[in-house]
Image: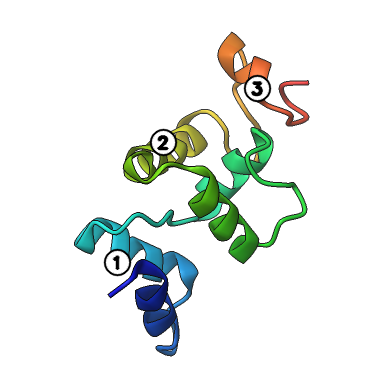
Amino acid sequence: MATDDAKEWLTAIKGVGPKTASVVLNFHFGKPTMAVDTHVERVSKRFGLVPESASNQAAHDALDDLVPDELIYPLHVLLIRHGRERCSARGADCDNPVCAAYCDCEYCS
């Protein structure tokens, strides 16, 4: 089954949204689809990968289109880690010049 068809099938189940469908497809079936949780969405917006005004679904779609299939899983893991450890919702630890060079958030500007 194609990834988009599988996503559509899963999200038709009550209580299953795009994130859960993407987690199941990526982690359990190895399908190339980005699971966008709060950390992935926040960091992606701060780095300008998706527009700040993008909905969660728009962030899913944009990242699926933007990120090469072979990088979806490792980038997902890295974005979550970065969001938890350095780029939280309450503030960011932007002393890293690489982050500051690419991040548009109020903490790095």
Residue carrying label 1? 24
Q: CA distance from mark 1 to mark 2?
A: 19 Å
Figure disc tally: 3
First reached walking from the N terminus: tag 3 or tag 2: 2
The secondary element bearing badge 1 is classed as helix
Residue drawn 38% across the image and 84% down it: 9
82 or 89, nearer to the observer: 82
The secondary element bearing badge 3 is classed as helix
Residue drawn 59% across the image and 22% down it: 93
| Amino acid bearing label 2 | Arg
Residue carrying label 3? 102
Residue 69, given in percent of the width and then of the height, sits at: 37, 46
Above or below residue 36? Residue 105 is: above
Numbered tag placed on residue 81 in the rendering: 2
Residue drawn 72% across the image and 21% down it: 108
Q: Is residue 104 left or right of residue 39?
A: right
Q: Sort mark 3 into few (<14), some (14-19) or many (20+) by Cα contacts within 10 Å.
A: few
| Amino acid bearing label 1 | Val
Q: Sort mark 1 into few (<14), some (14-19) or many (20+) by Cα contacts within 10 Å.
A: some
First reached walking from the N terminus: tag 1 or tag 2: 1
- Whether the residues at callouts 3 and 1 have beta carbons within 8 Å, the answer is no
Q: Quadrant of the C terminus?
A: top right
Residue 26, given in percent of the width and then of the height, sits at: 30, 58
26 or 104, nearer to the observer: 26
Q: Quadrant of residue 42?
A: top right
Above or below residue 51? Residue 33 is: below
| Amino acid bearing label 3 | Tyr
